[in-house]
Amino acid sequence: MSAAGEYGLGEDYQWPRPPVDGWTADDLDKLPNLPPHTELIDGSLVFMSPQTRFHSRTMRLLENALMEQAPDHLEAIREMTVKLDRRNRPEPDVLVVPVDADEGPRQTWFRPEDVVLAVEVVSADSVERDREVKPNKYARAGVPHFWRVEEDEGLPVVYVYELDPAVRAYALMGIHHKKLVADLPFPLDIDLTAVNRRR
């Protein structure tokens, strides 16, 4: 069974043709018939492949754990874009943002200065983007914390990074197997083996 969406595009459908200078972050909310979870990277539209079960369960585990353990002024949220600049609006798998960054029910993106933590769960079609392109862009935009999550024998392995503000680059602070215990961005204790457990 395929997880691919049926968009009902007829033979006469024409895919959006980019302007000469590429798309802008503001265009993302206006273009019709885009697949769900479309990102903008360097002015180009990036379409997401269907999610794997590991990817979906890992996002749920991390969002729930972050939400439960975050201080009252922060919240975790999944799959919202971040308007880094005019030509870049990526969609991290999970974000931690201040509660007061809420602009209402129709909000579709956050500012980089509102992002406390960005989490990317690496997929087969996003390896280079999640390991290289997006972390560099988050760091240059000043996002203080970044996690990259890889799959190893069905379990998440979390690579935890912290921003060096002097050079706007991330430093690796730890690699977590089975259990993630950290002090930043707030005290955390996450059982990574719970990814396959149902409540």
Image: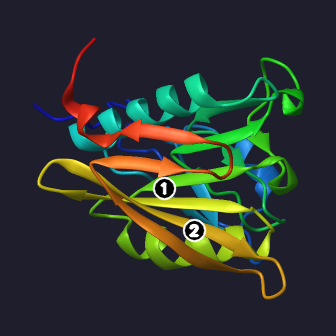
Q: Residue at x 52, y 43 (%)?
A: 37
**Precedes in sequence: disc 1 or disc 2:** 1
Gap between marks 1 and 2 measured at Cα: 12 Å
Secondary structure of the residue carrying tag 1 is strand
- Coloring scheme of the render? rainbow
Q: Quadrant of residue 173?
A: bottom right
Q: Which residue is mark 1?
A: 120
Decide if residue 39 is in sight here: yes
**Left/right of residue 46 with respect to residue 128 in the rendered view:** right
Q: Which residue is mark 2?
A: 161
Mark 2 crowdedness (10 Å alpha carbons): few <14, some 14-19, many ≥20: many
Q: Tell me the quadrant of the picture where the N terminus can be found.
A: top left
Foreground disc of the pair 1, 2: 2
Q: Name the residue nearer the viewer: 174 or 52.
A: 174
Identify the mark at residue 82; answer none if there is no mark. none
The quarter in which the C terminus is drawn is top left
User: At 78% across and 56% down in the image, what residue appears?
Assistant: 25
Residue for point 51% across, 45% down: 93
Q: Amino acid at mark 2?
A: Tyr
Residue at position x 63%, y 32% from top? 76
Residue 153: x %, y % from top left: 11, 54
